Image (cartoon, grey):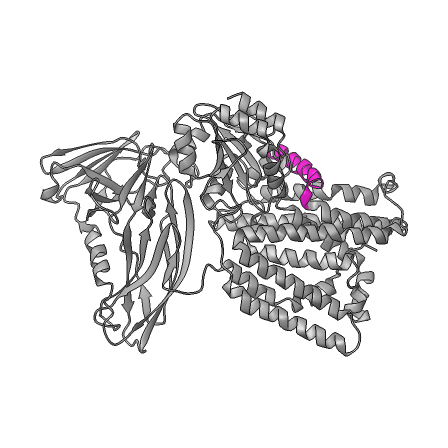
């Protein structure tokens, strides 16, 4: 009988007892309690309102997010330019009240090397009109906003906030009237085409505008298309005045995804003084004359054009572990790579705790060949079906527009906390703190003996949950290809990965020669079982560390306290008499209190490993790890510097091993310093669409990934498990 500590019924009961954990998980995912102001070192965000005549049908009611940026930081317009993301506002309003679109002020242009972005610095208000329907009643209007914005300097930090504001229906709300008036004044004014036109050609877009303000004549203007990806914002372009007609030739992006029949443009005076929004522009909807040239294959929209060009400079990627690019892989090669990667996954640190369970289970079944085979099939089914389910969920979320990759589930603090609870329970059971028969009625506890195949199946599910964050050799390219294949072929790759991971156990259960190599049952099993509790607890320590990277020290401490109370609960359930009921009740009350009292006050930290946008020094003077961003990488490559990028995550054990060994080796760091290599660390601990996009451009869909970029040279993709010799050899070729 397998030594799975918790049978299905036991797991169901413990889940019921641990319902407060869901409240803790939700609080960890939340940004902050509702407020009108959210403050960070990069920006201050405030929900403000302007209702000078009160809240009533037909009266002007405006709300808006006011962003005050720290010096050198900016957020983005509706078309962010070469990179970045526009600010998003999601409103929750009472019945009878609806929100319109953002009345975007005219943006500024922020050149960064050969790139350019469109957005705002200083202080800016993004106003939104509210429409109050006839029949609206109530003494006040409650406005709730969930906002997200990307604030950038050379690095970028995603921020978000939950806001609530209550406006009195009677009386005036006009405290921020001046801020709204400034936003209205900076908004572009709609202007009829009046003979204006746009003429696309190969490599350029000609624009001729008539009827622009007379005071603009002879001045340099700036050009902001509302359609993203249409032009190359940072490239050189020409403009001139022909009387009262302004003409321009703007570089056309070969990778544009749209060929519109009309062009929505905002034009304004170039380089206005001050900060905040740009000078008030005009918005013109220009008809397109002629035919758009054919567009090239679209690169990933989350990467700047210069970065994409550097990545695609040569189609062949070299490196001792990277192999050829994913595009050159056939489906058969991907299936083979997934099968081999699944086999190697059994040797990754993520899977060690589950290996201990399987060793004990196989030893106990050594005399029952039929049960051995049945459990081998059940374990294989659990692994393969779990990989298929994870793959299907990943593909579905990506099809819905989410930028996710392999191991995405451990980007959720709630999932990390749930796994920590599960491994704590397993460790306590292995250590002998409680037995199933002590905490459950005998009829329920006997389900484990009657359903050993179900336990084997659940072991496969558990193994997949723990192994999925790892990316073994041969897995990276296969998974990178899988996410771009049709669904049926992609799921075949995920299935092959699961089959590879389960294959050793399937062979051991069906091939007598393999089974004979396994240890025989004996007294050693009790000692071994108790010993295996410690790998479980070590896994809990790792999960707590991951949660600390995601949610800060408060989140890790709250979960640790919950685990202590959970241990008290399972101990109390093993007592007899009145003390059992008393201690168990106190423990459950403690879990409820932790979930609903401590949890909502937990705040998140934005960055892992103490970066927070700051350099991480190395043992070599003058050399440090910098925070990765598409702009930073593109700038460094354009300067002619080699760039080494470490795509990592706190929940990736292999990443942390490489970080503390090979990537911290003094010889490697000395070579990097001598070659003037820039070290960038792309942290994927929490969901980051830019990192996902960069991985996809390398044909990868999980971490670790190590890549060396150099201007005019093929990108080198190194192996997942780094050695000092491999990295030094790659640096020596620069």
Comparing 177 with 326, the one in front is: 177
**Residue extending farthest top:** 733
Q: Which residues are magenta?
A: 330-350
Residue 476, visible in the rendered structure: yes
Quarter that holds the N terminus: bottom right
Q: Residue at x 50, y 23 (%)?
A: 674
Q: In the rendering, at what x and y percent does residue 445 appear? A: 79, 66
Decide if residue 393 is in sight here.
no
| Above or below: residue 574 compared with residue 128 | below
Q: Residue at x 66, y 69 (%)?
A: 17
User: Residue 116 appears in which quarter of the rendering?
Assistant: top left
**Magenta part, dominant SS:** helix
Whether 145 is drawn above or below 215: the answer is below
Whole-percent x and y of residue 531?
79, 51
Is 144 placed left or right of 454 in the picture?
Answer: left
Rendered location of residue 234, percent (x, y)? 31, 34
Q: How many marks?
A: 0
Question: In front here: 55 or 179?
Answer: 179
Horizontal side, residue 24 vs residue 190: left or right: right
Q: Position of residue 716 (x, y in %)?
A: 53, 27
Looking at the picture, tell me which residue is in the foreground, 603 or 710.
603
Which of the 4 image quarters holds residue 152?
A: top left
Magenta run includes residue 337? yes
Seen in the image, is 266 located left or right of residue 668? left
| Residue 376 lies within the magenta run | no
Taking depth in this image into account, of 548 and 364 the one nearest to the observer is 548
């Amino acid at each position: 009988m397998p030594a799975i500590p918790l049978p299905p019924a036991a797991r169901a009961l413990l889940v019921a007892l641990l319902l407060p954990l869901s409240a803790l998980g939700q609080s960890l995912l939340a940004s902050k309690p509702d407020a009108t102001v959210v403050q960070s070192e990069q920006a201050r965000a405030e929900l403000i309102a302007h209702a000078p005549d009160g809240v009533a049908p037909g009266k002007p009611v405006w709300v808006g997010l006011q962003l005050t940026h720290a010096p050198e930081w900016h957020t983005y317009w509706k078309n962010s330019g070469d990179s970045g993301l526009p600010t998003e506002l999601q409103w929750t309003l009472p019945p009878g009240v609806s929100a319109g679109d953002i009345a975007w002020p005219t943006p500024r242009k922020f050149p960064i090397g050969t790139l350019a972005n469109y957005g705002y610095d200083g202080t800016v208000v993004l106003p939104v009109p509210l429409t109050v329907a006839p029949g609206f009643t109530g003494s006040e209007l409650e406005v709730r906003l969930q906002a997200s914005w990307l604030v950038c300097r050379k690095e970028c930090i995603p921020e978000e906030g939950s806001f609530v504001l209550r406006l009195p229906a009677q009386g005036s709300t006009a405290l921020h009237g001046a801020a709204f008036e400034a936003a209205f004044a900076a908004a572009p004014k709609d202007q009829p085409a009046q003979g204006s036109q746009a003429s696309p050609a190969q490599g350029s877009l000609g624009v001729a505008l008539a009827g622009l303000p007379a005071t603009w004549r002879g001045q340099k203007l700036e050009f902001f298309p509302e359609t993203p990806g249409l032009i190359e914002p940072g490239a050189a372009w020409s403009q001139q005045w022909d009387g009262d007609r302004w003409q321009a030739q703007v570089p056309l992006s070969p990778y544009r995804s749209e060929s519109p029949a009309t062009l929505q443009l905002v034009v304004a005076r170039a380089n206005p003084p001050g900060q905040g929004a740009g000078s008030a522009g005009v918005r013109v909807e220009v008809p397109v004359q002629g035919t758009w040239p054919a567009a090239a294959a679209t690169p990933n929209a989350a990467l700047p054009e210069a970065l994409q060009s550097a990545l695609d400079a040569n189609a062949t990627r070299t490196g001792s572990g990277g192999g050829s690019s994913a595009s050159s892989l056939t489906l058969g090669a991907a299936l083979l790579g997934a099968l081999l990667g699944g086999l190697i996954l059994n040797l990754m640190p993520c899977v060690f705790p589950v290996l201990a369970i399987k060793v004990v289970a196989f030893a106990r079944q050594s005399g029952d060949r039929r049960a051995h085979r049945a459990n081998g099939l059940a374990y294989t089914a659990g692994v393969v079906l779990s990989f298929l389910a994870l793959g299907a969920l990943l593909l579905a979320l990506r099809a819905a527009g989410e930028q996710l990759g392999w191991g995405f589930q451990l980007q959720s603090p709630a999932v990390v906390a749930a796994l920590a609870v599960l491994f704590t329970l397993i460790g306590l059971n292995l250590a002998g703190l409680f037995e199933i028969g002590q905490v459950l009625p005998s009829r329920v506890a006997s389900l484990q003996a009657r359903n050993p195949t179900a336990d084997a199946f659940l072991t496969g599910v558990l193994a997949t949950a723990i192994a999925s964050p790892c990316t073994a050799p041969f897995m990276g390219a296969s998974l990178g290809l899988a996410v771009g294949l049709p669904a049926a072929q992609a799921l075949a790759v995920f299935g092959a990965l699961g089959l590879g991971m389960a294959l050793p156990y399937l062979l051991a259960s069906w091939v007598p020669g393999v089974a004979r190599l396994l240890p025989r049952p004996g007294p050693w099993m009790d000692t071994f079982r108790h010993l295996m509790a410690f790998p479980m607890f070590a896994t809990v320590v790792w999960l707590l560390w991951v949660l600390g990277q995601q949610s800060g020290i408060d989140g890790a401490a709250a979960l640790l306290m919950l685990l202590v109370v959970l241990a008290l609960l399972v101990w109390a359930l093993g007592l007899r008499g009145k003390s059992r009921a008393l201690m168990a009740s106190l423990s459950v009350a403690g879990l409820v209190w932790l979930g609903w009292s401590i949890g909502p006050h937990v705040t998140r930290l934005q960055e892992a490993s103490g970066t927070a946008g700051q350099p991480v020094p190395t043992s070599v003077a003058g050399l440090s790890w910098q925070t990765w961003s598409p702009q930073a990488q593109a700038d460094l490559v354009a300067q002619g510097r080699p760039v080494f990028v470490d795509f990592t995550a706190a929940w990736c054990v292999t990443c942390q091993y490489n970080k503390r060994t090979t990537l911290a080796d003094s010889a490697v760091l000395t070579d990097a310093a001598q070659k003037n290599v820039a070290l960038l660390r792309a942290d994927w601990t929490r969901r980051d669409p830019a990192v996902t996009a960069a991985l996809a451009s390398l044909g990868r869909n999980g971490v670790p990934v190590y890549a060396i970029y150099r201007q005019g040279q093929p990108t080198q993709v190194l192996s997942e498990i780094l050695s000092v010799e491999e990295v030094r050899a790659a640096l020596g070729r620069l």
